[in-house]
Amino acid sequence: MASIRRWLLGWLIFGLASASVIAGFGIFHTARQEASELFDYELRTVALSLPANIASTGSDANRSPDLGDLADDRIIIEIWDLDGKLVYHSHQTAVPERQPAGFHSIERAEYHWRMFGVQQSQRFIQVAQPFSVREDLALRLALHTLWPLGVLVPVTIVLVLLVVARGLAPIGGLSRALATRSIESLDALQLDGPVPVEIRPLVDAVNDLLRRLSVASQAQRTFIADAAHELRSPLAALKLQLQAASRDGTLQGEGPVLERIEGRLNRIIHLVQQLLTLAREDAQPVAQMVPVSLRRIGEQTVGDFSLLAEAKQIDLGLECEAASGPNDPYPVQAEPHGLSVLLGNLVDNAIRHTPAGGKVDVILQRTGQGIGFAVVDTGPGIPEAELERVLDRFYRGEGAQGQGSGLGLAIAARVAQRHAVTLTLRNRESGGLAVSVMGF
């Protein structure tokens, strides 16, 4: 995957390194040339500044020149008189041939020499210097001119890293703002600090897309809510008319037929009620958290479903585990209506899928993960392969018993997501299903 950061850093550092190499080569070459000119000037200065009373060699006859010793053998001096006789040379070594006046470069005895000769009134002076000495000194001088560049390059690289990181920081901020947004949040993006001109079109385009998505989502929610509301009213009226006609005898038919019609009407009404609940939950993407007594919600839910449980001969009860006292309210931060919907759907789902004579318990819990609750039943449970899918909307397992719309657990999962709590399903070893909601 292409990376703007790596692309910028790669080309900037490569360009800087290339420019530094070229600049270093130019500086090094120029420094060597200037050093060579300086040494030529040194040869000329030495030749012109020799005193007139030098008349003998003054060096040890057995001494061999060490051309690597910069202190003793940097320069060889030779002087001839007007008759062409060598009257002075600074070392007891073979005398380089006399060259014409001016600068010359020669090779002798495996050494390269740089020589300067000058004709004076009574003598001819020739000064020679090995190229190895000159190159060594020139190299040192050239390297001394390069150390600022060696310091400048890493400092510039660090500066480039910081500048690129700083320049791309708004893009990183935009990425984090998008990554940390809730799936339900369709508000416009708000970045920390001013938005750079370069990414302003991107931010505007994203905000425009979010606005259009918000309009479309709201239209869908409104449609579902309106449709559910419009369906619920005539169905409820139809059920009342059916019951009234059955009582006054105007409706003719067998008892089982009427029971099946009423059962189907009840199922349709339940489905519409679930759709209306789901539409309301979708229309409230952000939960308004307030202090709520989980115990009071549990008692109210158990009371609301007691008649349904009694009709199916199911033992419905409320248990309090790890209570801090006899009247522990189990306080949580939640949206009251949403919490009631969450617990109500789990209890309703448990009662519908538990056979007659079974048991459903709402257990309030206090653990290291916080306060929560579990709805435990003695029903058939859910096959392990379907535990993940039962949270999908309208999904009913192949072996599902009882009447249902396939929306109860989906609604519960939606409410749990809005409250940022964890909803887990597991089959009990003794039989039945346990649905836990923790993290309040």
Image: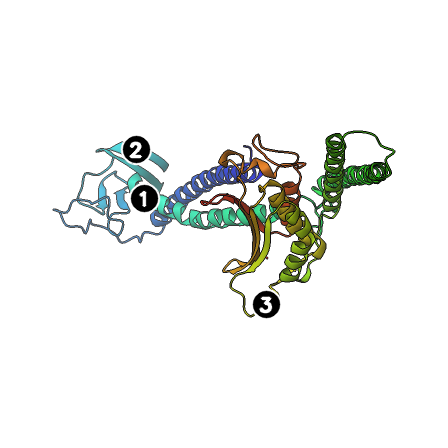
Q: Quadrant of residue 260?
A: top right
Q: In which quarter of the image is residue 394?
A: top right
Residue 415 in view (yes/no)? no
Disc number placed over residue 106 in the picture, else none: 2
Above or below 114: residue 194: below
Task: Name the N-terminal-most of marks 3 and 2.
Answer: 2
Q: Mark 3 or 2, which is nearer the eye? A: 3
Q: Do the residues labelled 3 and 1 touch (CB within 8 Å)?
A: no
Residue 161: image x %, image y %?
53, 47
Residue type at tag 1: Asp
Q: Nearer the viewer, residue 213 or 87?
A: 213
Q: Quadrant of the N terminus?
A: top right
Pointer 3: what residue?
A: 328
Residue type at tag 3: Asp
Residue 57: image x %, image y %?
20, 49
Disc number placed over residue 136 in the picture, else none: 1
Q: Do the residues labelled 3 and 2 touch (CB within 8 Å)?
A: no
Residue type at tag 2: Ile
Q: What element carries label 3?
A: loop
Residue 72: image x %, image y %?
24, 51
Above or below 385: residue 311: below
Q: Do the residues labelled 1 and 2 touch (CB within 8 Å)?
A: no
Residue at the location (60% across, 45% down)? Answer: 350
Task: Name the N-terminal-most of marks 1 and 2.
Answer: 2
Disc number placed over residue 159 in the picture, else none: none
Q: How crowded is mark 1: few (under 14 residues within 10 Å), some or many (20 or more)?
A: few
Q: Which of 12 and 36 is in front in this view?
A: 12
